[in-house]
Image: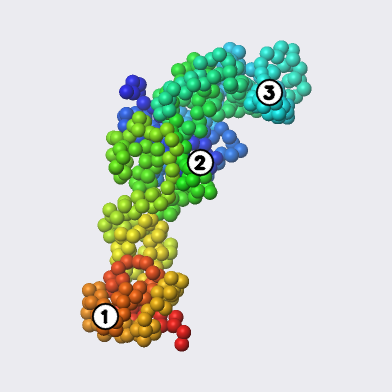
Amino acid sequence: MIKKAVRVRFAPAPTGHLHVGGARTALFNYLFARHHKGVFILRVEDTDPARSSEEYYSSIIDALTWLELEWDEGPEAGGKYGPYRQSERRAIYDEYLHKLKQSGGAYECFCTPEELEERRERMRATGEAPRYNGRCADLPPAERERLAQQGLKPCLRFRLDPKADLTFDDLIRGRVEIDAADLDDFVIARPDGSPTYNFVCAVDDANMAISHVIRGEDHISNTPRQIAVSRALGFEPATFAHVPLLLGPDKSRLSKRHGAKAVLEYKEEGYLPEAFVNFLALLGWSYDDERELFTLKELKKVFSLERVAKKGAVFDVDKLRWMNGVYLRKFSAEELFERARPWLEPAGIVGMEDDERVALARAALALEHDKVKTLGEAPYLVEFFFTEEIEYDDRATKNLLKLPGGVDMLRDVAELCAALPDFTAEALEKSVRALAEERGVSAGKVIHAMRAALSGRTTGPSLFEMAALMGQERVVKRLMKATSVYKR
């Protein structure tokens, strides 16, 4: 039972394009907010100017927009808790850094990177976990002044109480036990004064009244530090829920070697946003053991964190392709063509004002309706209707060479096609099968050879419907051309 007003946030860093893991996190936050009639916030964590860029920021916005995950507060939407880009909140962070420093909750650390690394190496050599040893925690004022006069610029470290209770109840993973003594005094501001992730995250979550933090389990190690900062500043920490990581087929963490890509790459390949959202929702969450297809509207009604699994979820591209195909098959032939048009036009299949080619492309794509998995496949599926130069792939060539009677049989089929007064799929099939039976040849071998001759491939739509759409003259011409694959 949720007892407080739900306010959740998705907080991407614009240091790269939005990938599937981040998109899944955004979706879970969005669905949780909508299910509980709460607020979904987009907060951009761009405090790393060296790695952040406007290109990546725009890409993230475009990806979320494509997925139809509309945010209630954030960039482009506004809200009373802004600004929603961390790069614009520096004055807010400086205020809280000063507060912690004045209260003794933080202290200046003059240790150089070289000194810190040397200490870490010594600790590793003795089998200890590398951590800061608190050397600067209680430096006398005079010593601080002396180090400052030497030109050393200190960072600011959070003073962590080793006896603090940092254990928290996770809505997905249950009680997470944390021993504060295992943590060190972590940096909350760099030598140039810029704040670090765990500090700004805690401040922003409190200032934006975030009720629930829903994010990947790789953030579990950050949670106790953010809880400590929140309490030191007098804030009540949010409720946490850490969702399982996405895994590749080999059960290791999902990465580029598994084919993981940016969300917008899936858009470019012709996946539908509604299918992609449905697929993402099932990565670590399930409604029951049977149902797999959900609209976004349905997901808002049934989503709950209680049904999010603890174990990692496998990202299966084959299942995504299957699901996308299911959604495509729901379209009418006209809608399928219009959805595919942005891929057909650049490929030169159709033009803006060529009605004849448009009609042919629409009809050709309709023949493939049951097989198409992505809109990006559309040009390939129909291109052989729009070229006079058919290239036979290796398997198609083998099918042609397997035809009993070879050249003579192929010529007989061409003559049969040329003589048909009614060139329809039904009439063509009846005549071809009759010819095969008359010659004592397997109808299947004749059909396979015809497909190879007409399309250069071994798979495709119904042969006879394909031939009828292609037209009598073109069919005869291609059958005769295919005789060239036989050695004289």
Sequence order check: which comes first, mark 1 or mark 2? 2
Locate residue 191: give its quadrant.
top right
Sequence order check: which comes first, mark 3 or mark 2? 3
Q: Residue at x 32, y 66 (%)?
A: 461
- Category of crowding for the residue at label 3, using alpha-carbon neighbours closer than 10 angstroms: few (below 14), some (14–19), many (at least 20): many
| Residue at the spot of label 3 | 154
* Residue with the most extreme front position: 440
| Residue at the spot of label 2 | 253
Q: Which mark is residue 82?
A: none
For marks 3 and 2, give the one nearer the viewer.
2
Is label 2 in a helix, a strand or a loop? loop
Task: State how many labels appear.
Answer: 3
Locate residue 313: give its quadrant.
top left
Q: Would residue 128 be visible to someone looking at this image?
A: yes
The vertical placement of 484 against 172, above or below, is below
| Residue at the spot of label 1 | 437
Query: Which one is nearer the viewer's eye here, 270 or 162?
Result: 162
